[in-house]
Amino acid sequence: MKVTAGTFHHWLLAQEARALLTRLDRVKPFVLYETMVPAAALSRGAQASIEGYLASGRDNLRGMVHDYLHWLLGADGHATTPEVAQRHFTLLRLRFNTVLTQFDLFSDAITQRSEHDTGVWLAGLDALAQDALELSGDYYPAPEVVCYLDRGVGAAIRRARTRLPGGGENPVAVIRVPRERMIGSGIASSLVHEVGHQAAALLDLVNSLCAELQQQVGDAWRYFERCISEIVADFWSVARVGVTATLGLMGVVSLPRAFVFRMVLDDPHPFPWIRVKLSCAMGAALYPHRQWQRLARLWDAFYPTAGLNAAAHALIQELEDTIPEFVALLTQHRPNALHGRSLAEALDVDARQPARLSALFKTWHGASRRMRAAAPALVCAVVGQAKIDGKLSAEQESKLLARLLTQWAMRRALEVSAPRATAFVY
């Protein structure tokens, strides 16, 4: 177009809009440029969901840019003021940046798949998370799960079907796991805790439990109600991986004493001291065994309550007195989504009783093909039980889990052409 003083702003904004299109065309699907071995790749379902979501966003944005150019260079655009034309372009650019932000969100989770060993281990964590999320029953369609590593000691989840930055619904669950936990059974504790948040949302557990907790009287019940979202996630972890969950939790919250007893009553996380006690109580309710009392006593020895002020002592005493009744309510809770079954029944805790886990480890020892063929969450429960039983050293545990993560990644990569239960030798 011929540029004059009156059309200069049209020309400049049109160039900027066209520049957005050129940059948008450089945002390619991950499958075209991410290099990784097949075993490290996302599951086909996760890959398709992410690529489909991002492609839709790019197409929508491309259409918006073309519509803007058509308006800007047409009669309506020429009749408007530079201020209005600029305002429309600014909104368009903000949308462009949103698309890039969402692309980068998934890029962080995918790029690590190219790292030697790490990429395959992440695919193994995907398989573990998927297994921990699924229930034997038609309760919900489980979304795909994608894991990635980051610094820090805590894990976090961006749940599937929640709002992404800038709008849109997250197509998969994305779990950030702490790099410092690779590789030990503690990674299962953190990972399955985050899976528990996704499961709780799918079953609407927080709302259904709050309805019951609000019928109870006392400050302890109000405290547990405020923390119920994190408590439910801890419960899911204990139910899926047994004592592995409690050992991992103790590792995460073993902090200086001031933090362990830091009682911030509006924090959704229970303060660390009582959180470990709750985990032990959940384990004892689901899997009666003296190991839970042993761990609770050890926690008392690590962090004795002597020296706390009177208010802290009183709160701790009330919470501890209420824990048995609270945990009973939790294990026996029957949300509508479970069609009359309790949480303990739906999570099939009988398969993870300590004696059974110990027997499985003894059976599997020297017959690793059986271990590789078993469900990942069950295997992590067995490994944690062997650890507390003194049957597995830290060095042996790390080596074993590295091999298992690799095996689960291989099995998932090959399951399209082979039965799921087949154990491929690594």
Image (spheres, rainbow, N blue to C red):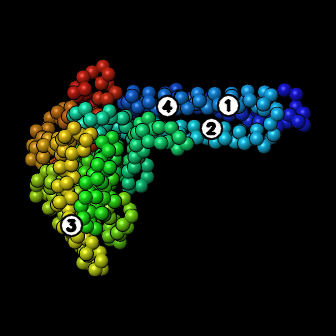
Label 3 or label 1, whichever comes before in sequence order: 1
Residue 360 in percent (x, y) is at 12, 41
Q: Residue furthest right?
A: 5
The reply to whether callout 3 and callout 1 are in contact (CB within 8 Å) is no
Local SS, label 2: helix
| Amino acid type, residue under disc 2 in the picture | Phe
- Say which label, 1 or 2, has the lower sequence index: 1
Q: Which residue is mark 1?
A: 65
Q: Nearer the viewer, residue 402 or 66?
A: 66
The three-letter code of the residue at mark 1 reads: Val
Q: CA distance from mark 1 to mark 4?
A: 19 Å
Quadrant occupied by the N terminus: top right
Residue bearing mark 3: 320
Do residues under tags 2 and 3 come within 8 Å of each other at their CB atoms?
A: no
Q: Is residue 60 above or below residue 189?
A: above
Cα distance in 3D space between marks 2 and 4: 15 Å
| For the residues bearing labels 2 and 4, Cβ distance under 8 angstroms | no
Side (left or right) of 107 relative to 401: right
Q: Where residue 38 sits: x, y (%)? A: 39, 28
Query: Residue under circle 2?
Result: 96
Q: Are marks 4 and 3 in contact (CB under 8 Å)?
A: no
Dot 1 or dot 4: first in sequence order is 4
What amino acid type should be assigned to the residue bearing mark 4?
Answer: Tyr
- Local crowd at mark 3 within 10 Å, few (<14), some, or many (≥20)? some
Residue in view at x 41 percent, y 36 percent = 172
